[in-house]
């Protein structure tokens, strides 16, 4: 299953695969099946060796340190998705976050093929990397933030919170 991890506040080594850029203290949604190895560091953190595309032998592994323990990551890995396929609103022709305009199109993705998900700086959109077997990874820009993405995975729906404020004024003569 996909699991939400948070990187440590310092990162000394960036991934050799330039498709992603790790940012300190940032949440990422990872496919726990792509974890090659985990080790405990500093009691409460995990050193993770991760492979973006587990189907591609030439895809390099990289390391990241997560604020979650190995046990917490194992728990994430054991959570089942609501469905084997997930409907996501994507921007079909987007090549970057600033290309995400217009009406997104709903496309279904196998959950097991989603490798990596990261948010834009405004936390309103997500970039998702999908494994396409020996063909490599393909990026998709999704009209969800990571919290909405997780809602869709776990419950099959997204939650929208709205609030209204009303004011009353009284005029006196």
Image (cartoon, rainbow, N blue to C red):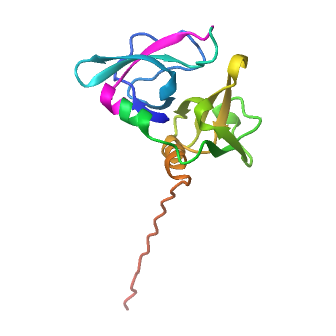
What is the count of numbered marks? 0
Please state which of residues 14 and 87 is positioned toward the viewer in this rendering: 87
- The quadrant holding residue 112 is top right
What residue is rendered at 66% in x and 38% in y? 109
Residue 27's place in the image compared with 62, above or below, is below
Residue 33 x %, y %: 50, 26
Q: Is residue 26 visible?
A: yes
Please state which of residues 36 and 21 is positioned toward the viewer in this rendering: 36
Please state which of residues 68 and 96 is positioned toward the viewer in this rendering: 68
Per the rendered image, the range of residues in magenta is 58-73
Give the residue furthest to the bottom: 173
- The quadrant holding residue 93 is top right
Report whether 156 appears left or right of 91.
left
Residue 131 x %, y %: 65, 25
Give the residue furthest to the right: 93
Report whether 27 appears left or right of 152.
left
Report whether 127 appears left or right of 32.
right
What residue is rendered at 37% in x and 35% in y? 75
Residue 150 x %, y %: 50, 44
């Amino acid at each position: 299953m996909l699991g939400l991890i948070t990187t440590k506040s310092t990162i000394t080594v960036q991934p050799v695969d330039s498709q992603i850029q790790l940012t300190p203290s940032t949440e990422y949604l990872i496919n726990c099946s792509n974890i090659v190895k985990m080790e405990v560091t500093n009691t409460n953190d995990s050193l993770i060796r991760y492979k973006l595309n587990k189907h591609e032998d030439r895809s390099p592994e990289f390391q990241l340190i997560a604020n979650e323990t190995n046990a917490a990551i194992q728990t994430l890995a054991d959570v089942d998705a609501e469905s084997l396929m997930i409907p996501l609103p994507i921007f079909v022709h987007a090549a970057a976050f600033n290309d995400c305009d217009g009406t997104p199109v709903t496309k279904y993705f196998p959950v097991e093929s989603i490798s990596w998900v990261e948010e834009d700086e405004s936390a309103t959109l997500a970039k998702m990397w999908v494994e396409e077997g020996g063909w490599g990874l393909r990026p998709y820009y999704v009209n969800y933030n990571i919290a909405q993405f997780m809602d869709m995975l776990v419950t099959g729906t997204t939650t929208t919170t709205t609030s209204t404020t009303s004011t009353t004024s009284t005029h006196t003569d």
